[in-house]
Image (cartoon, rainbow, N blue to C red):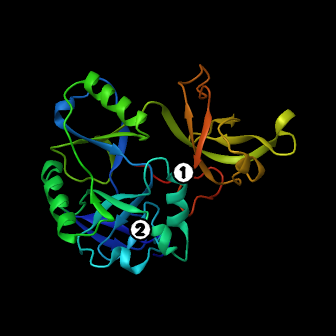
Amino acid sequence: MLAGLGLLALGGAVAADPRSTPALMQANVYRPGVDLGAYWLSEKYDGVRGFWDGRRLLTRGGTEVQAPAWFTQGWPAEPMDGELWGGRGRFEEAVSTVRQETPDDEAWRRIRFMVFDLPAHPGVFSERILAYRSLVQGLGQPWVQAVPQERVSSHEALGHRLDQMVRSGGEGLMLHRGDSRYRAVRSDDLLKVKTHEDAEAQVLGSMPGQGKYAGVMGALLVQSPDGRRFRIGSGFSDALRKQPPQAGAWVTYRYRGLHDSGLPRFATFLRIRSDADLSSPIGAQPPALR
């Protein structure tokens, strides 16, 4: 798919618009006090956001995914929102597979397209669940799967479910408001539930290591979208310390609250953002996250 090709929501339908990226629903972070009875609960899949526009498979940044022809053969004209997922604990493998310009057929056979919504469907989410289940069942392709949805009634029950998910290797959970229509905005209609806080920052450069990290990268100097600059010095593999992300790339990091200065406490590198076109001018805004 061509970079920059996107979708624009118009009157409940989705039409191709080469000037924009896909118009996708985006999530806020869960906070206690939310009326959980209004929401459906599902796993938060740790993969690459995929959007089928009825003809092509796009990343959330609008880049065409070069999947093998068989992977999307027979897919409907109706747009599908989902996650290209390689299984729990296989994020890097999924990213590597999806980003290849020449598809690796064997690697793609380990990828699943986890469908969790139908952006052009006019109904509320509770109705869209039934619709995407029916659509996926009709396809009859084992690599296309409908994301299971369940109900949870209390914060305690949600915490228990989150603990179970993390212990089994999952990243977290998603909450989707049952009476919401598909809107390509960030709102409480969609909430992510995780055991830690995370955020995005842009790489400004790397700093040389000392001691056991002599000769390799010791820390990344990064900048948050609002201009705050800080260092990330932990969470890196040996390979990344030898070849750190370049200036302009966007990375995801974990942290434990904020200092009085507003800087993150205990910032730890998590991953390079999975989009194929991450490097951008310093000061640019990061691509939207689910």
Task: Check disc 2 and report its element: helix, strand or loop.
Answer: strand
Is 62 or 139 nearer to us in this picture? 139
> Where does label 1 land, which residue?
285
- Compare marks 2 and 1 and give the one earlier in the sequence: 2
Name the spot of residue 203 as percent of width and height, x first. Answer: 67, 47
Instruction: State which quarter of the image contains the N terminus.
Output: bottom left
Name the spot of residue 145 as percent of width and height, x first. Answer: 28, 60
Name the spot of residue 5 as percent of width and height, x first. Answer: 43, 72
Amino acid carrying label 1: it is Gln
The residue mark sitting in front, 2 or 1, is: 2
Amino acid carrying label 2: it is Leu
Residue occupying image coordinates x 46% and y 70%: 65
> Where does label 2 land, which residue?
58
Name the quadrant containing residue 22: bottom left
Name the quadrant containing residue 166: top left
Residue occupying image coordinates x 49% and y 59%: 94
